[in-house]
Image (cartoon, rainbow, N blue to C red):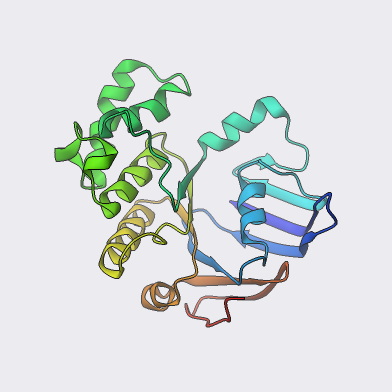
Amino acid sequence: MIEFSDVTKSYSVGTQALRGVNLQIEDGEFAFLIGPSGSGKSTIIKLITGELKPTSGTVHVNGYSLERIRKREVPYLRRTVGVVFQDFRLIDTKTVYENVAFAMRVIGAREREIRDRVPYVLELVGLENKSRRHPNELSGGEQQRLAIARALVNNPSTIIADEPTGNLDPARSLEIMSLLQEINNLGTTILVVTHENDLVERFRKRVIVLNDGVVVSDGLDGYYRYENQ
């Protein structure tokens, strides 16, 4: 579960990114996080992953208290949270298989575990026949599927998808969102940060709207329009 209680975050330059945010995302939920540029979305992601600590208030993520988490505990927190980025962040010199296996090796997984887990995850995202390809041999949609596979391979309870369709055409965007829906159906909590109103409208999920560091709307009817400032 992700829970923000009266969270504020101020940066050293004086910017107040969050102003008393209260938010709870339950295990197994699928939610969109939307809002104009500068509204605080990136700060929320960085708080969830332990990159930042709140200035005040409390943040709880999958059993960890982020306002007092110790440095040595952060890697364990991050094993519970997979992150998918807009720019994929793949290793071009490694194959599809090796990109996913690398995510397991960095946390000390055994080779037998890697051999069992990686093919399963590649099949889940539809890349089982491209395991020997390199990222530059894949389409944009396939690269994003690979990024999702890498986020999934350590079996996190939560996936944060930060603008996962920002570099894709509408058809590929729909494919990626449908894949995230399938992963959610298997029990993984999904939080998608996006500017794409059409996808938000189509999938009709809970939508959390941020503006100027404040949650201005939080609903289950699935669609809110806003001005991208």
Q: Give x and y (percent) for residue 95.
A: 26, 30
Residue 169, placed above or below residue 119: below
Tell whether 103 sits left or right of 209: left
Determine the image quadrant of residue 177: bottom left
Residue 111, placed above or below residue 205: above
Tell whether 87 sits left or right of 181: right
* Of residues 163 and 138, the one drawn nearer to the viewer in this rendering: 138
Give the farthest residue toward the left: 129
Name the image quarter holding the C terminus: bottom right
Q: Residue at x 50, y 71 (%)?
A: 206
Q: Give x and y (percent) for residue 163.
A: 47, 59
Q: Give x and y (percent) for residue 55.
A: 82, 50
Residue 211, placed above or below residue 225: above
Tell whether 116 sits left or right of 105: left
Q: Residue at x 37, y 44 (%)?
A: 147
Q: How many marks?
A: 0
Q: Residue at x 34, y 51 (%)?
A: 186
Q: Residue at x 32, y 28 (%)?
A: 93
Determine the image quadrant of residue 71: top right
Q: Give x and y (percent) for residue 92.
A: 34, 34
